[in-house]
Image (cartoon, grey):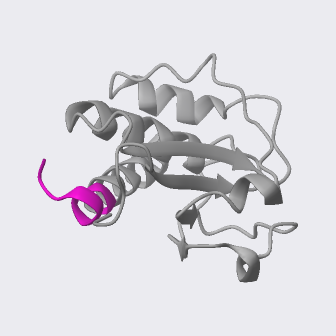
Amino acid sequence: MSDATPTDPTRVAFVCVQNAGRSQMATAFARREQVARDLDGQIDIVTGGTDPADHVHDEVVDVMGEKGFDLAEETPRAISQDEIMDVDIVVTMGCSAEGICPMTWRGDARDWDLDDPDGRDLDEVREIRDDIESRVSALFDELVGDA
């Protein structure tokens, strides 16, 4: 982020197929990091899916509620190739992001290879959630340090 300016924020996208589980959790944690580190205008967060679901998975809503996040009203959304072209870092969640070719991503593409929480028991979903939380924190440490 060394060459970014307040008018040129680093854009990070969290992408998966349904945008109903892992990418929603990552986005919630990223938004929290953005506020906690006072990075408004320095980091933009984008999320979406290549085939979005109708709603965030119930088990994801439940375990994120335990951490103080209300994802019940979040709506999974589609992310387009054009939108991806505008981000600096694309993080996929371990699922195939068909329809969005990583070869055309302008910036850094990473895959976190996370299990899909859909239909899993709450203890398994908590493990996925906690893994995502630590990965998001590490990503922000990498981008801006301990601000």
Residue positioned most to the bottom: 103
Instruction: Check if residue 59 falls in the magenta segment.
Output: no
Residue 69 lies left or right of residue 80; in this view the side is left
Q: At 58% from the left edge and 62% from the top edge, which residue is drawn? A: 93
In this orientation, which residue lies closer to the viewer: 127 or 1? 1
Residue 36: percent from left, percent from top: 22, 33
In this orientation, which residue lies closer to the viewer: 142 or 76? 142
Relative vertical location of residue 39 with respect to residue 106 in this rendering, above or below: above
In this orientation, which residue lies closer to the viewer: 35 or 65? 35
Would residue 119 be visible to someone looking at this image?
A: no
Residue 72 lies left or right of residue 103; in this view the side is left
Residue positioned most to the left: 146
Residue 24: percent from left, percent from top: 57, 40
Q: At 63% from the left edge and 29% from the top edge, which residue is drawn? A: 58
Q: At 56% from the left edge and 50% from the top edge, which residue is drawn? A: 22
Instruction: Check if residue 143 falls in the magenta segment.
Output: yes
Relative vertical location of residue 4 with respect to residue 51 in this rendering, above or below: below
Magenta-colored segment: predominant secondary structure: helix
Which stretch is magenta?
A: 139-147
Number of on-image labels: 0
Residue 53: percent from left, percent from top: 81, 38
Residue 99: percent from left, percent from top: 88, 66
In this orientation, which residue lies closer to the viewer: 107 or 124? 107
Residue 99 lies left or right of residue 5; in this view the side is right
Q: At 40% from the left edge and 46% from the top edge, which residue is drawn? A: 43
Quarter of the image for residue 97 reads bottom right
Relative vertical location of residue 40 with respect to residue 128 in this rendering, above or below: above
Quarter of the image for residue 90 reads bottom right
Q: In which quadrant will I find the N terminus?
A: bottom left
Would residue 117 be visible to someone looking at this image?
A: yes
